[in-house]
Image: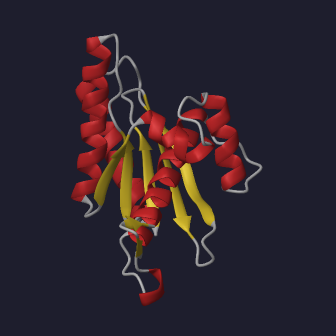
Amino acid sequence: MRVLGIDPGTLVMGWGIVEKGPSGRLIRVGDGEIRANPKDPLAERLLKMSNSLKKVISEFRPSSAAVESVFFARNVKSAITLGHARGVAMLSAVESGMTVSEYSPSSIKQAVTGYGGATKDQVQKMVMAILKTAVLARPDAADALAIAICHINTASFSASASAPRGPLSRPRRIKGVAF
């Protein structure tokens, strides 16, 4: 399983690709930040984000994508602009034939650090520890790697939870209580 994590933005869009190896170990395949000129019109920045993401997808061939979902924002204009960036990221992935999953910021932090209120620095350090790398990814790229890690762990858990059970793992009842 090779996952593209995307931390959307209209000035900086982080991307990170994580693969689950045969032993179950998570491997950092690549990461980076797509930067746009803040003086360019929004439409041009979105086009740059889309074209750059498509190049990443073409080069690394991930099987699925995960994007950070919308969070509460006090500034409505910022929330709408971020929504545009999320739409571009999701469309770029879907056009490339991938499925796209969304995760809230707190669920990403929970999956990576064990605490949904973790700081950006804590997430960055845990990403390094999980991927066993000494190289510190740039902040938005580290967030994207965290999103990919969250997706892999969530997908792995969902797959194992829905896997058929053998005869010894069937729920048993004792005095009307399942355990």
Q: Residue at x 27, y 50 (%)?
A: 92
Q: Residue at x 23, y 48 (%)?
A: 91
Q: Residue at x 73, y 47 (%)?
A: 135
Q: Look at the image and tell me whether residue 12 can be seen.
A: yes
Q: Is residue 112 left or right of residue 104?
A: right
In the rendered view, would you say 100 is above or below 48?
below
Which quadrant holds the C terminus? bottom left
Name, please, the residue furthest toward the front: 175
Name, please, the residue furthest toward the right: 134
Q: Is residue 32 left or right of residue 126?
A: left
In the rendered view, would you say 130 is above or below 22?
above
Viewer-proximal residue, 49 or 62?
Answer: 62
Give residue 37's quadrant in the image.
Answer: top left
Q: Is residue 133 left or right of residue 69?
A: right
Q: Is residue 17 left or right of residue 71?
A: right
In the rendered view, would you say 36 is above or below 74?
below
Viewer-proximal residue, 133 or 129?
Answer: 129
Q: Residue at x 59, y 33 (%)?
A: 139
Name, please, the residue furthest toward the bottom: 167
